[in-house]
Amino acid sequence: MKQVSPPSCLQNAFNNHHLGHVKVLEFPDGTRSAADAAAAIGCDVSDIGKSLVFMTEGNKPVLIIMNGADRVDETKVAHLLGLDIRKADANEVRTHTGYAIGGVPPFGHVGPVETLIDEKLLAKKIIWLAAGTPKTVFSLMPDELRAVTGVDTGVDISA
């Protein structure tokens, strides 16, 4: 593991939200999946915040930050949003966030993306998140994640 610089959009978000203390770490074996990230970091898989992009029926992106141990219940999310949803494909993920699947951070995207956060994840002491590539991660306190995303309250969206 080594400390690296994040992509510029993510670095700008760190700077804009007074998160200059955040260290981005790179793991040579990768952190593409929640299980890979947990193994590399040495934490529980539920401490990983996986950033998953879904599309609403109107082709609007929705980012769901889910704890790594659980799956998203798409029916719960659709009910919460009042719209049908589907998983975004790789091109849609890159178009709306600027990142490839496996490296999508929770913020610092190329454009605005509505965000929902799993309530179990916000109960953690430390949350590990993708930092723009399938090999990089960073950690935040739940209050820091709330402040940057503007999401005050987590939601029950696990299957």
Image (spheres, helix red, strand yellow):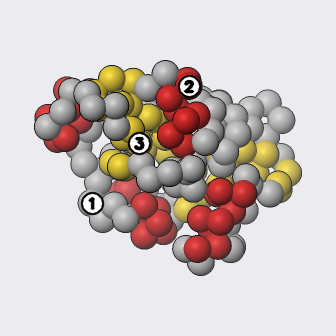
C-alpha separation, residue under disc 3 versus residue under disc 2: 15 Å
Residue 151 vs 80, above or below: the answer is below
Report crowding for label 1: few under 14, some 14 to 19, many 20 or more residues within 10 A (C-alpha).
few
Q: Residue at x 18, y 33 (%)?
A: 83
Disc 1 versus disc 3: nearer the observer: 3
Query: Where residue 109 sits in the image (x, y, percent)?
Result: 55, 51
How far apart marks 2 and 1 lie (CA) works out to: 30 Å
| Left or right of 94, for residue 121 | left
Give the tally of numbered discs: 3
Q: Nearer the viewer, mark 2 or mark 1?
A: 2
Q: Amino acid at mark 1?
A: Thr
Q: Amino acid at mark 2?
A: Asn
**Circle nearer the N terminus (3, 2):** 3
Which residue is depicted at the point 50% across and 40% down? 96
Q: At numbered mark 1, what does the secondary structure look like: helix, strand or loop? A: loop
Q: Nearer the viewer, residue 73 or 109?
A: 109
- Spot occupied by residue 114 in the image (x, y as percentages of width and height): 35, 49
Among the two numbered marks 2 and 1 on one chain, the one whose residue lies closer to the N terminus? 2
User: Any mark on residue 63, and which?
Assistant: 3
Image x and y of residue 35, in percent: 58, 30
The numbered disc on residue 153 is: 1
Give the x, y percent position of residue 5: 80, 57
Q: Is residue 120 left or right of residue 23?
A: left
What residue sits 83% from the left and 46% below the top?
A: 1
- Secondary element at image label 3: strand
Badge 2: how crowded within 10 Å, few (<14), some, or many (20+)? few
Instruction: Tell me if I can see residue 89 in this picture.
Output: yes
Q: Of callouts 1 and 3, which one flags the residue occurring earlier in the amino acid sequence?
A: 3
Q: Give the residue at mark 2.
A: 91
Q: Which mark is residue 79?
A: none
Q: Are marks 3 and 2 in contact (CB under 8 Å)?
A: no
